[in-house]
Amino acid sequence: MKKSILTIVVFAFALVFSTEAFAQKFSKLDKSPMDAAAYPASYKVADKLVKIVYSRPHLKGRALSKLAPNGKVWRTGANEAAEITFYKDAMFGGKNVKAGTYTLFTIPGDNEWTVILSTAKNVWGAYFYNESEDVVRVKGKVTKGNKSVESFSIAFDGKDTNATMYLGWGDVVVSVPVKG
């Protein structure tokens, strides 16, 4: 009897202190949190055409031209380069793209941005961007937004299998047509 009580006490003691000793330490919210955009946007629609996973940097009083300079390859977000998944063969900016996952790079410009789909995977930034890994390059039309967007954002809008991907940051909005 004494042995079983001692066993229970030791077990209870271990249980109480085990949560302290093995507690998971979770990191704080990232300064450029990860987000996703998809078309169709509704989470109730299982038959997606496209989805992008990206991180959302903030302007914080900085100029867009300093964070995504014209003429230089940009990771299209922050941290890891954005990844875009096409769930079926599609037309992206008027060019055929096979179903699959690609890294999304951009080259900003005043009137248009070059939007690049690359076979590179698990890419941090655009430091190791290699043009030989490009699948397609398309032109994204640049317009000025009605109000400034503080955090880099990607959204889709459309009807049926015709959509437009929008990249927005500051007063810049870049659009690329996507068709399923």
Image (cartoon, rainbow, N blue to C red):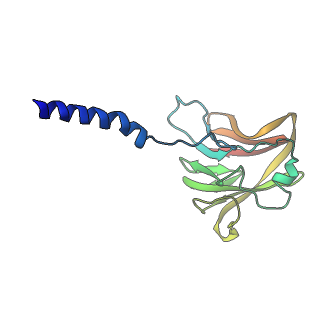
Q: Quadrant of residue 118?
A: bottom right
Q: Left of 128 or right of it: where is 21?
A: left
Q: Is residue 172 left or right of residue 27?
A: right
Q: Is residue 171 left or right of residue 157?
A: right
Task: Name the residue at 65% across, 42% down.
Answer: 33
**Number of on-image labels:** 0
Q: Quadrant of residue 23?
A: top left
Q: Position of residue 166 (x, y in %)?
A: 74, 41
Whether 53 is drawn above or below 42: the answer is below
Front residue of this view, candidates 134 and 24: 24
Which residue sits furthest left?
1
- Which quadrant: the C terminus? top right
Q: Quadrant of residue 53?
A: top right
Q: Quadrant of the N terminus?
A: top left
Residue at the farthest front position = 2
Expressed as whole percent of the image width and height from the top left, the position of residue 109 reads 86, 55
For image coordinates 64% across by 59% down, the residue present is 124
> Closer to the camera, 80 or 8?
8
Which of 175/30 is in front? 30
Viewer-closest of 163 and 6? 6
Q: Position of residue 134 (x, y in %)?
A: 66, 64
Q: Residue at x 67, y 52 (%)?
A: 79
Coordinates of residue 125 in the picture (x, y in percent): 69, 58
